[in-house]
Structures are given as C-alpha cells and as structure tokens.
Image (cartoon, rainbow, N blue to C red):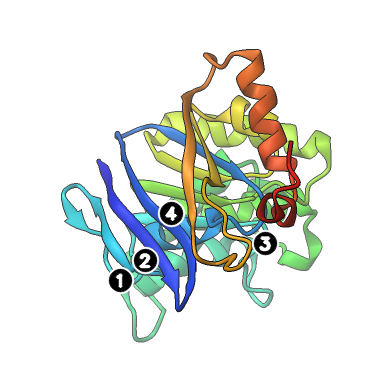
Amino acid sequence: MIEIKNLWKEYGDNVVLEDISKTVNDGEFVTLVGTSGCGKSTFLKMLLGMESPTRGQLLIDGQPIPDEPDQSRGIVFQQYSVFPHLSVLENVMIAREFERAPLLGKLFGGRKKQVREEARALLEKVGLTPAADKYPHELSGGMRQRLAIAQALIRKPKVLLLDEPFGALDPGIRADMHQLILELWREHNLTVFMVTHDLSEGFYLGTRLWVFDKVRHDPQAPGAWGAQITYDLPVGEIPADTLAKMQQQINEPEDKKITGESA
C-alpha cells in the first residue's frame, strides 16, 4: 500500500533522512522510535503531505503522495488541534463540512443532518457522547485527545498518523487511550504510523517497530548524514539483547554519538 523508495530529506546542508526504502502493507500498525531530532516527525509530515522528499519516492497505492493533506490521511498530534469556540460535536462535524463545502465550511438541510449523525456515531465510539455539547476548555486532557481522534476519523482516512499523541497524558488515561486506538485500528482497518519516545508503548501498540538512528557521523559536519531505519522488527519477536541495544540507541544523546563518546 505504501512504498518508500530511496527516500532522502534535506534542508540545505542538513541531511535529516537518508536513503530509506520500505514497503508497508494495508492494515499494518508501524511504531516509530528514536532519539529527539532524528527525523521521525519529519517522516510523518511527508506521509501527510506537509513536506516533500528531497530525493526518492513516497507512494500510496502506486501514486505519489499529494503535496498537501487530503482525506486519505488523518493526523493526531500531542497538542490538541481543536477549535475552542466550537462544541465537541461541532469540532467533529467541521472537518466534514469543510470537505463538502470548502468555501463556506457550512452545510444545510439533509447534508448537515447526515454529517451530524456521522459525528454523533464517532463520539459514541470514542466515549464522548455525554460531552457532545461541551467546549474544549471544559474537557480533560484525555477527553480532548479522544476528540482529536474523532476529528481525524470522520474523514474516513486510509492512513492514520499519530505524532506522540499520548505523551502528555497520565499513565491511567494513557492506558485507556491505548485500548481505544487499538479498537479503532481494528474496526476501521486503518494503516497506522505512530511516533513515540516510549519503547514499551511502541511494542505494545504496533505490529511492526522502526528505530530511526544515524549510522554515519562526521564530527566536523554533524548535518552531513541523516537518519536511517536501523531496525525494522515485527513486534513480539525481539531478542532481549537486541532490545537492550535499541534502548541504548534511543537514550544516547546525539552529541555523544557525534564526538565518538558512545560505548
């Protein structure tokens, strides 16, 4: 479904990602881990269409990913992308309204009723029906994240992109969100890419785990080389020594790698 062919991303002389080639099938749940600044979120933005490859190809169903976001890909950030002046129900409806009426962002009559019913059905799935008429400032962090997920799903995307969506949540709420996202993934047959700094979260949620890391380092030119996918592993089949090595890579500061101070 998604093909990554010799993908590079550069900003001037700074190489962020280099020579990545992978294939992801329909329905996979890929979790992305790695040190801060290694290009995980940049890769997610390229999948969304907010960024374009410098070299190589990024294809979905054999076609280049469009240069701007569309309804085939939905995204949920750690920071909640909700409209404070709209109710919970209106926040979910508005994505569909702008899709069907891009100039006005408003629907009327039967079309509006249909979208309202779709939004209410999604709120039921994410457990927000009692809060449908509340405003974002009246919601807890976990409820706002549920709202952001409903916003992404109402457009019925093929691919769901999650950029550290649960990092700011308390452990108990985070566990509830894990269960919710797994249920929605299975029910909607989504292909999911999720960035996380939590290795255990990546193992628990994903069917496949990618570790982003720089293989080559030049102390005189720290931006000369970009990150690659150093591990591509099916979850549940990871030896203990490999796990320990991956954790060391993720925790190790980038400056130590560049200066050769790592073990």
- Alpha carbon distance from label 1 to label 2: 5 Å
Q: Which residue is mark 4?
A: 154
**As shown in the figure, which amino acid type bears the numbered disc 2?**
Gly
Circle 1: residue type: Asp
> Pointer 2: what residue?
49
How packed is label 2: few (under 14 Cα within 10 Å), some, or many (20 or more)? some
Q: CA distance from mark 3 to mark 4?
A: 18 Å
User: Which of these two is toward me, 91 or 233?
Assistant: 233
**Of label 4 and label 1, which has the lower sequence position?**
1
236, above or below 152, in the image: above
Residue in the foreground of this view, choosing between 179 and 36: 36
Answer whether residue 126 is visible to the viewer in this image. Answer: yes
Q: Earlier in the sequence, mark 2 or mark 3?
A: 2
Give residue 239's quadrant in the image.
top right
Cα separation between marks 4 and 1: 22 Å
Element assignment for label 3:
loop
Q: Position of residue 166 (x, y in %)?
A: 69, 46
**Residue, far bottom:** 103
User: Circles 1 and 2: CB distance less than 8 Å?
Assistant: yes
Tell me the element at label 1: loop
Callout in the foreground (2, 4): 2
Can you identify the residue that label 1 sits on? 67
